[in-house]
Amino acid sequence: MVRVVKPEENYKLPLTKPVVGVAGKTGLWRTMRPVVDNEKCTRCYQCEIYCPVNVIRVEPELGVTIDYEYCKGCGICEDVCPRSAIVMVPEPGE
Amino acid sequence: MSKSQVKPPLPYSARDVVLPGDAACHGCPIPIALKVLSAVFGEKVILVVPACCTSVIVGTYPGQSLRASIIHVPFASAAAVASGVAQALKMRGVSDVQVIAWAGDGGTADIGMAALSGAAERNEDLIYIMYDNEAYMNTGIQRSSSTPLGAWTTTTPITGKSEHKKDVAKILVAHSVPYVATASVGYPHDLYSKLQRARSIKGFRFIQIHAPCPPGWRFDPKYTARIAKLAVETGFWILYEYHNGKITLSGPSRPLLDPSKRRPIEEYLKLQGRYRSIAPELINSIKEYIEDNWSWVKRYLL
């Protein structure tokens, strides 16, 4: 028989919770910005599958959208795109 | 896509668990692998993470970048803690949660080897995933036993590492565990199908994921997927599954049994700064090592 021990009332354990942006707004890390040409895009999903930050969304009707608030600008999406529909352009300076 | 068509699991099932804004470097392969993992298991996982890049990536208190349960454990104990958690879940009758030990190559091939071997020998009901970025990356690119021959690291500075890579998947095949597979972040669909296969099997399952690390291997972050694919296409990294005593080559590696179909290894080496000063005789040694690996795989093929 297994007895489950529950913590007391109002006892706070130092547990982490899932949050978006644990490392802050990672979009600030970006020096190159991916720009999508949705005319060229064939909705093959490659950019979304390989995006390490999980900010790219491909929808058949809307095309590719990128959340620039968290995109780190690594450029993997540009490299995996078979139609060169994503181009990295330099971020404008301050 | 019409509404009658089924949405593909990649990327649709991989959208919710890995949250944006994690602490990974540019072009890090680990969140790509975590996304594929989440496409298979969703939130119903307990990740046991020893000290490795992932313990940095998921962030610090009070937040974490994964919608899943994570246990951070000391370096040597990933397989031991995962065994305990799996046994505890079994005692409590929880059957819909998968325990996954998620460790780097240092925590698997060097420091966690004893616990891993013990858990494999006891055939604990868990999945052990080793993502192999071929050095201790988050502490500053020190050599591990999984670093390949000739690769620069901060502890093998001028001529590169003088020993070959330790093949952990081969060691696990020698343990005769129910399931051993090698995968690569360059082939997410292959990794997805291997995780699905692992999910359907009981007992100790081991998957080794080849993960090119941009800062550690000295290449442009955008080439992560390209280098992972090149490692497979040159035959340096063989994708296979070991199940029921025999090895099955996976799709991308299947034609490469014929050496003439492989791309030259130089294509893989020249993209990476860590091989910049590699001696020509070491390249020949790497070629022999690749041949040895393939002849080992051939012996288990039916």
Image: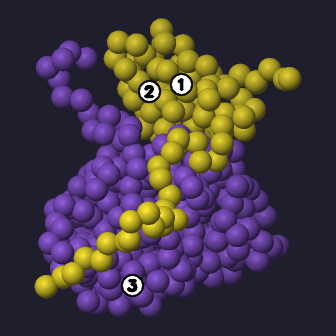
Chain colours: A yellow, B purple
| Residue plotted at (80% across, 20% down) | A92
* Residue A35 % position (x, y): 61, 19
* Residue B51 % position (x, y): 57, 73
Q: Chain of mark 2?
A: A
How far is mark 2 from mark 1, CA to CA? 6 Å
Q: Quadrant of the N terminus of chain B?
A: top left
- In the image, which is nearer the foreground, mark 2 or mark 3? 3
For the residues beneath circles 3 and 1, the answer to whether they share a chain is: no
Is there CB contact under 8 Å for labels 3 and 1? no
* Depth check, front residue: A25 or B8: A25
Decide if residue B287 is in sight here.
no
* Depth check, front residue: B223 or B120: B120
Tell me the tag on residue A66.
Answer: 1
Left or right: A82 as drawn, with respect to B302:
right
Query: What amino acid type is highlighted by mark number 3?
Result: Ala
Q: Chain of mark 3?
A: B
Left or right: B229 as drawn, with respect to B98:
right
Is there CB contact under 8 Å for labels 2 and 1? yes
